Image (cartoon, rainbow, N blue to C red):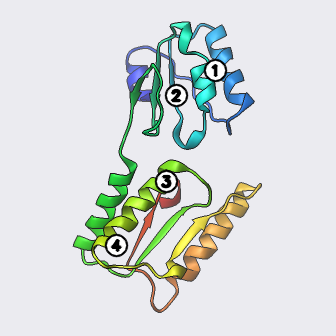
Amino acid sequence: IQDLLLEHYYLPISMTTRGGVKDKLCINRLIDHRVDALIAAIADATISFETISSITGLGFPTVIFDCPANCDFAFDRAMNDDFNGGYLAGRHLLELGHRNLACGTFYSKRTRGSLRVDGFLNALSEAGVAIKPEFIFSKIFQDDPADNDKLFDATLESMLSSPDRPSAIFVSTDFMAR
């Protein structure tokens, strides 16, 4: 998106907040400063439905992407099928012959990652393949991001040093796939 905007002489402004009051404040400031349009991701509830809904009547060009299937806004939106994406990833790994699999996700109620994991597990279930409980792991958010990475790395290292290590690992986000 950023490259395309720059190619057409628009200056993209990126921001990330953890939701709530900061989202609304940032969006209102952008509108007050007369930006041309708003392109927002509301994946995993990073921007609340209430915040996006608050600009519906302003006639402000808005595109929502990474929108969960249940979002019902009067904006243009780009959506994907997270469940099917996880399902296809599972089928692909099975077709490659993997049977000793691991699955990683964020420890939260993030709907998009959860849908990917559900699709992945559904594909395995259809094929009669189960994941060992010790091969299902979560990245738990700590206050210090360095602690997150250390905990995640230790979990992976322990799993991969096991004599019965998984032949493939499915993770629910790009951040975890690093």
Percent across and percent down for residue 67 are 46, 36
Label 1 CA crowd tier, 10 Å (few <14, some 14–19, many 20+): some
Labels 2 & 1 near each other (Cβ < 8 A): yes
Q: Secondary structure at mark 1?
A: helix
Who comes first in sequence, dot 4 or dot 1?
1
Percent across and percent down for residue 126 are 29, 71
Say which of marks 2 and 4 sits in front: 4
Q: Secondary structure at mark 3?
A: helix
Who comes first in sequence, dot 3 or dot 4?
3
Please tell me which residue is depicted at 68% across the width and 39% down the height of the picture: 18
User: What residue is pinned by disc 1?
Assistant: 27
Separation of marks 3 and 1 at Cα, in angstroms: 25 Å
Please tell me which residue is depicted at 22% across the width and 71% down the height of the picture: 95
Separation of marks 2 and 1 at Cα, in angstroms: 9 Å
User: What residue is pinned by disc 3?
Assistant: 113
User: Furthest-left residue in view?
Assistant: 95
Separation of marks 3 and 2 at Cα, in angstroms: 18 Å
Say which of marks 3 and 1 sits in front: 3
Q: Is residue 140 left or right of residue 87?
A: right
Q: What's the amino acid at mark 4? A: Ser
Label 4 CA crowd tier, 10 Å (few <14, some 14–19, many 20+): few
Q: What's the amino acid at mark 3? A: Gly
Separation of marks 3 and 4 at Cα, in angstroms: 18 Å
Label 3 CA crowd tier, 10 Å (few <14, some 14–19, many 20+): many
Say which of marks 3 and 2 sits in front: 3
Who comes first in sequence, dot 2 or dot 4?
2
User: What residue is pinned by disc 4?
Assistant: 125
User: What residue is pinned by disc 2?
Assistant: 40
Q: What's the amino acid at mark 1? A: Ile
